Image: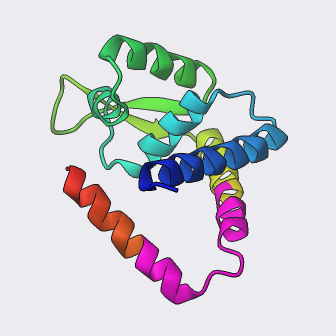
Amino acid sequence: MELSDTLFELIHSVRMNILTKVKQLDFDLTPMHLKSLKVISKIDLCTGQKLANFMGRDKAQINRLIKELVTQGLVIKKDHAQDKRSQLLVLTSSGQAIMAAFKQAEQEVFEKMLTDIPASQISAFTEIASKLKANLE
């Protein structure tokens, strides 16, 4: 099997397993909403522009998504102290609770995926994956 096929199948399998776990949690959120919450939780001083850039989406689409997350009570907008033209996106306690459950679901999938794989191979895979990513940046 070629590298491209192996990577495609691995990514697809991980995504499907995570989606199955997430459906069991009954969040009533789309994968795009969950990904947005995850990105907001990871990016320091996250703004709509940073979210759009990270996700590779246009600003109008991201603004609609942010509006939905705010309406659902998962995200709030705060004034940016250094840049008065933009607002920071911050998870609410409800958004944080969803992210905690989502991270737990991810962790369960990763634990299942890594069953019977020695730590040395996991470390080697992580190192190689990091180099592959760096080569593309």
Q: Give the camera-side residue of 40 and 13.
A: 13
Residue 20 as seen in the image, left or right of residue 53: right
Image x and y of residue 55, in percent:
37, 32
The image quadrant of residue 127 is bottom left
Q: Which of the colour schemes (rainbow, by chain, secondary structure, one colour) is used?
A: rainbow
Question: x and y percent of residue 66 in the render?
Answer: 46, 22
In the rendered structure, does residue 116 fall within the stretch colored magenta? yes
Q: Position of residue 41 (x, y in %)?
A: 46, 47
* Left or right of residue 77, residue 58 in this image: left
- Do we see residue 97 in this rendering? no
In this view, the residue farthest toward the front is: 1
The answer to whether residue 88 of the structure is visible from this angle is yes
Q: Position of residue 61 (x, y in %)?
A: 41, 14
> Main SS type for the magenta part?
helix
Relative to residue 38, is residue 49 drawn left or right?
left
Magenta-drawn stretch contains 33: no
Above or below — where is 27 with respect to 130? above
On screen, 125 above or below 116?
above
Taking depth in this image into account, of 127 and 28 the one nearest to the observer is 127
| Residue appearing at x 61%, y 28% in the figure | 73
Going 59% across and 18% down the picture, which residue do you hit? 71
How many badges with numbers are in the image?
Answer: 0
From what the image shows, is residue 35 above or below residue 9?
above
For the point 25% across and 34% down, the residue is 80
Residue at the location (27% across, 66% down)? 131
Magenta-drawn segment: 106-125
